[in-house]
Image (tube, rainbow, N blue to C red):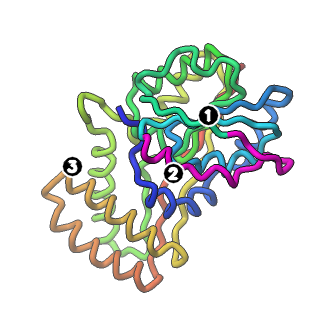
Amino acid sequence: MTISTATADWLTLRAGADDAARSPDLAALLSRAIAGRPVVVHDLGAGTGAMTRWLAPRLPGPQRWILHDGDAGILSQVEAARATDRSGGAVVVDTNVADLADLPVDAFCGAAAVTASALLDVITREEALRIVSACVRARTPALFSLTVTGRVRLDPGDAGDIAAAGAIGAAFNDHQRRTVHARRLLGPDAVPFLAGAFAAAGWPVRTVPTPWRLDDQHTELIGEWLDGWLRAAVAQRADLGGLAARHGERWHALAAAGRLRVTVGHEDLLACPG
């Protein structure tokens, strides 16, 4: 299984919206939880290093990050050189090409934290439990950011738009839970599942809504997101093709005119040893 599910261009396009959505409150709680420990952080499904760039300045130094991804190509485009710790010190960054399915149970021993961004919804129950087990064994706090919840809102919208968005959104969410190469993805069930797994181990869990709020400053991102949302829905339910085409044309026109507002639900999760 390849951890990465996105291109470097898509990660660059969404970076601003991601950074605006992430929870600084959970980052502050993580910083307090790791106080006094050597700051070694494992980032899963790291992509081009966005989590490092955002979180490193919120944590004490010196820091060492190990960025894991199943896609060697995307790891070769890591842009973590700009990352600094809270005092402005440089962050040491190592990369590791590995599949999450092969994660050793002792992978995080000695680490201060485990992080991931926009990852949990594209993994399986088994892979999620492997992550939880490794965190619990190492007593390593985990901060998982920007997991899709399945909630979407588009404004403006009349009754027809609302009904269409509901049908398309339901099909998209079913697509997120699909089985790929014998792997049943968690999709929008990911945060409740991980929260339950950590709670079963006796770990306190905090979750915070972290939605994208997209407006006329995000026209290109809205267009790319909208295309992907509609395409996935129709892949799940071909009978929605006509509906998606009609309303997609209207939504694209509103976006191009700077009038479309889109809220895409995400959630951040922090789990720490009890």
Tell me the amino acid under the disc marked 1: Ile
Instruction: Find residue 236 and name its label.
Output: 3
Under circle 2, the secondary element is loop
Q: Is residue 274 visible?
A: yes
At x 67%, y 51%, the residue is: 81
Label 3 crowding class (10 Å Cα cut-off): few <14, some 14-19, many 20+? some
SS of the residue under disc 3: helix
Q: CA distance from mark 3 to mark 2?
A: 32 Å
Q: Which residues are magenta?
A: 72-92
**Residue placed furthest toward the left:** 239
Where residue 203 sits in the image (x, y, percent)? 65, 21
Is 73 within the magenta? yes
Closer-to-camera residue (158/196): 196
Residue on which disc 2 sits: 77
Residue 188 in sight in this render: no
Q: Please rate how many residues cluster around mark 2, counting C-alpha atoms within 10 Å: few if below 14, some from 14 to 19, many from 20.
A: few
Residue 18, how many percent across, how many down? 57, 56
Q: Nearer the observer, disc 2 or disc 1?
A: 2
Residue 181 picture quarter: top left
What residue do we see at 81% from left, 34% from top? 32
Residue in the foreground of this view, choosing between 95 and 248: 95
In the rendered image, residue 201 lying in the magenta stretch gets the answer no
Residue type of the residue flagged with mark 2: Gln
> What residue would you read off at disc 1?
66
Left or right? Give the position of 211 relative to 222.
right
Up the image or down, 44 lies above or below 136; here it is: below
| Badge 3 amino acid | Gln
Image coordinates for residue 233, horizontal then vertical, percent? 26, 55
